[in-house]
Image (cartoon, rainbow, N blue to C red):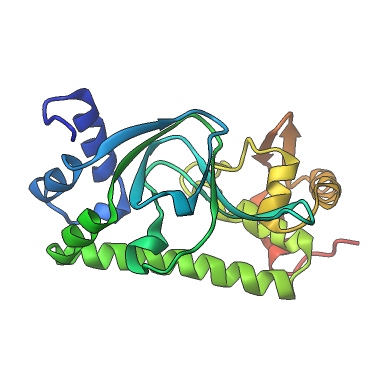
């Protein structure tokens, strides 16, 4: 439980007010949810399985990787990278059937957690929240659909450009969320190997589309990325 006069309460409320998940909801409605939550802290590199939890979690600060892995091939595929304002384990909220994914804290992580049954009831009695959560879920499904289509129809270079474009802040035109990932982690997100991503990043640098430092990527020319992603650019 979170005390109403605590610093954590005000931080949580401010985060809720800035999240599209809670658009159109009165402060009193948000209060009933926030006060039921508990703060959990996961240090960087914390690893957990989704089967361990009967809770839903809201990210108050930090970044989280959600992924699947093939131990025999020593390969993994990153499904999502989540940030402040995102929820997980969303599938368990709407479907009680077991599903297995892995969670890893990319940074020190603060999450607000509450039982799935409590969240389900809160959504049921708040129609605006019901609509918001389904819209959020639809966006996640659309991203998965796009990723599945792209992996079968597009080259890895085009997929890399699309991943970069999806993570550009529209106001600042700067790369966010994935800007400080290693090439290996970007490869896991694109669905390829580090060697392939290394080659493509060097190519994009030569084209003037990006600039790089140690585990850091900056966007230099968005239009070039757009042209490549739409297959309107010669990459010979």
Query: Which percent across, then down, holds residue 166?
Result: 56, 55
> Is 120 rendered above or below residue 201?
below
Give the left or right position of residue 169, taking residue 221 as reference: left
> How many numbered discs sit on the rendered protein?
0
> Is 27 rendered above or below residue 151?
above
Give the left or right position of residue 222, taking residue 136 as reference: right
Q: Which residue lies furthest to the left in this view?
A: 28
Residue 131 in sight: yes
> Is 149 rendered above or below residue 220?
below
**Quarter where residue 59 is shown:** top left
**Quarter where residue 151 is shown:** bottom right
> Is 85 rendered above or below residue 5?
below
Query: Which percent across, then down, holds residue 9?
Result: 19, 31
- The quadrant of the picture occupied by the N terminus is top left
Residue toward you, 1 or 138: 1
Residue toward you, 9 or 98: 98
- The quadrant of the picture occupied by the C terminus is bottom right
**Quarter where residue 212 is shown:** top right
Residue 23 in sight: no
Residue drawn at point x = 46 percent, y = 45 percent: 171
Residue drawn at point x = 73 percent, y = 53 percent: 71
Query: Which percent across, then down, holds residue 100?
Result: 53, 59
Residue toward you, 73 or 153: 73
Q: Residue furthest right?
A: 236
Query: Which percent across, then down, holds residue 30?
Result: 16, 47
Residue drawn at point x = 73 percent, y = 63 percent: 158
């Amino acid at each position: 439980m979170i005390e109403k006069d605590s610093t954590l309460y005000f931080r949580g409320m401010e985060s809720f007010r800035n999240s599209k998940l809670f658009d159109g909801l009165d402060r009193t409605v948000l209060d009933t949810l926030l006060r039921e939550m508990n703060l959990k802290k996961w240090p960087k590199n914390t690893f957990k399985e989704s089967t361990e939890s009967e809770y839903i979690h809201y990210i108050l600060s930090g970044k989280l990787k959600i992924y699947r892995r093939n131990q025999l091939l020593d390969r993994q595929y990153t499904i999502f990278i989540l940030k402040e304002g995102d929820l997980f384990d969303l599938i368990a909220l709407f479907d009680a059937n077991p599903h297995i994914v892995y969670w890893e804290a990319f940074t020190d992580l603060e999450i607000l957690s509450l039982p799935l049954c409590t969240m389900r009831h809160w959504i049921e009695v708040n129609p605006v929240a019901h609509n918001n959560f389904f819209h959020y879920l639809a966006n996640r499904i659309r991203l998965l659909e796009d990723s599945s289509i792209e992996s079968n129809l597009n080259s890895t270079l085009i997929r890399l450009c699309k991943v970069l474009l999806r993570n550009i802040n529209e106001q600042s035109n700067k790369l966010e969320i994935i800007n400080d990932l290693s090439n290996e982690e970007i490869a896991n997100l694109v669905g390829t190997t580090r060697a392939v991503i290394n080659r493509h990043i060097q190519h994009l640098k030569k084209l003037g589309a990006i600039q790089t430092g140690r585990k850091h990527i900056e966007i230099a020319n968005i239009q070039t990325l757009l042209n490549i992603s739409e297959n309107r650019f010669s990459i010979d």
